[in-house]
Image: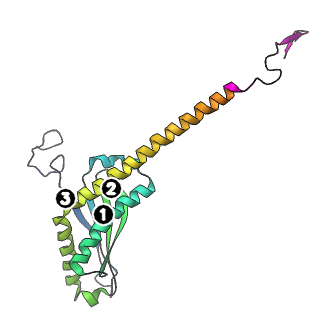
Amino acid sequence: MCNAWNHADTCTCGFGPPYPDMKITVTRWADRRHPDPRTLAEVKLLFPIPRANLLANLDSGGTVRVRAAAREALQDLANRRFGVNRLKIATTHLTRGSLEIGVVVLMVGSAYAFFKSYEDLRKGVLLFLDDVRAVSRYLKERVQRAYSREEKRVQERGVKGAARADQHRRSAAAAVAQQPPAPGALRAPVRRRGVERT
């Protein structure tokens, strides 16, 4: 039986390498009954990037930039397949683990002015997803580079922030050490009638 410890190189069970560059899942299609749908499909892209388990280290700006790296590449593919300003690609979320990016395929203008029928609409989206699969290695590398860049930026900022805080603590301690004692701070305690007073 195949598992994480007993895993052949040729196996595609998902327990271990070799991992696919990307897994595509369509989570929702356009409503067939809608006379002019804007959202053609919602898609989930899963990139097996082990370092993405540390997604909590990215700030909100970093996650936006990683999503933008994927969106720009996908938009280029949509423009090549359907023409400029036909379909719009939007990203909805970025989750940790194997890096998951939510993608929404949106229609610019009337869907059925471009696609003849609902079946043509589905075929068009499936052709687009075939294009995405064909460049899955490029997409994975692009997303991984963006993720690594943002992770490094956050780590560098954290190291610099810790160094600044340490320098601030040292300078504050040095300033306190250089200050003369307050008047009466070094006066010896005086005993009067069994009560110690300073």
Q: CA distance from mark 3 to mark 2?
A: 14 Å
**Neighbours of disc 3 within 10 Å: few (<14), some (14-19), many (20+):** some
Q: Is residue 65 above or below residue 57?
A: below
Q: Is residue 38 above or below residue 191?
A: below
Query: Pointers 2 and 1 in contact (CB under 8 A)?
Result: yes
- Residue 175 within the segment the image draws in magenta: no
Identify which amino acid the numbered label 3 is placed on. Answer: Arg
Q: Nearer the viewer, residue 28 or 69?
A: 69
Q: Secondary structure at mark 2?
A: helix
Q: How many marks?
A: 3
Q: Hey, which residue is sitting farthest right in the picture?
A: 193
Measuring from the top left, give residue 10's x and y in whole percent. 8, 49
Is 152 left or right of 8, judged from the image as shown? Answer: right
Query: Pointers 3 and 1 in contact (CB under 8 A)?
Result: no
Which residue occupies 63% across, 29% down?
A: 173
Res. 108 image quadrant: bottom left
Q: Which residues are magenta?
A: 177-198
Res. 141 image quadrant: bottom left
Q: Secondary structure at mark 1?
A: helix
**Neighbours of disc 2 within 10 Å: few (<14), some (14-19), many (20+):** many
Q: Which quadrant would the N terminus be assigned to in this image?
A: top left
Q: Which residue is mark 2?
A: 146
